[in-house]
Image (spheres, rainbow, N blue to C red):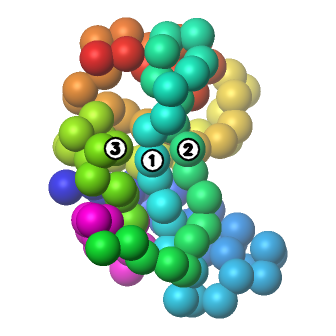
Amino acid sequence: MINITDKAKNHVDNLRKTEGYSSDYNIRVSVKGGGCSGLMYDLDFDNQTNPADQIFEDKGIKIMVDKKSLLYLLGTTLDFSDGLNGKGFQFVNPNATRTCGCGESFSV
C-alpha cells in the first residue's frame, strides 16, 4: 500500500489543474537507479496503465506503481512540504535504510 497525506493530495489536485491534466491522469511513482544514495524516486502524471502495474487509491488519488518499484515502495507515504527547508514532494519510506540530504534518493 502507498498512502498520500492531505497536503500532498491538495498539491496533486492543484498541479493537475494548473498543468492542464484531466482527471483521468493518475500519479505514477517509480524507483530508478541513480542519485547520491543509489536509488531515486520518480513522480509524474500518467494515464496509461501497464499490465504489471499495481494501483492504489488513497483520498481519491490513484497511485500507479510498476512491479519492480513496488518492492522498494511498499508502506511509503507521499507527503508535501512547503517549509523553509525545502519545497516539494517527500517520500516517507520505511524501507529506506539511508537517504540523501535532499530526500530525492535512498538506499535499502
Q: How far apart are marks 1 and 2 (CA)?
A: 5 Å
Amino acid beneath label 2: Asp
Residue 65, percent from left and from top: 36, 58
In the rendered view, does 93 fall on the left or right side of 17? left
Q: Give the range drawn in magenta.
A: 52-63
Residue 76 seen in this snapshot: no
Q: Distance between the residues labelled 2 and 3?
A: 10 Å
- The reply to whether dot 1 and dot 2 touch (C-beta < 8 Å) is yes
Residue 60, quarter of the rendered image: bottom left
The residue indicated by pointer 3 is 69
Residue 12, quarter of the rendered image: bottom right
Residue 22, quarter of the rendered image: bottom right
Instruction: Give me the disc on residue 102.
Output: none
Residue 98, percent from left and from top: 37, 10
Amino acid beneath label 3: Ser
The residue indicated by pointer 2 is 42
- The reply to whether dot 3 and dot 1 touch (C-beta < 8 Å) is yes
Q: Is mark 2 on a helix, strand or loop?
A: strand
Dominant SS type (magenta): strand
The quarter of the rendered structure image containing the C terminus is: top left
Query: Which residue lies at the image location 53% right of the left edge and 89% below the top edge?
Result: 24
Query: Which residue lies at the image location 31% right of the left edge and 66% below the top edge?
Result: 53
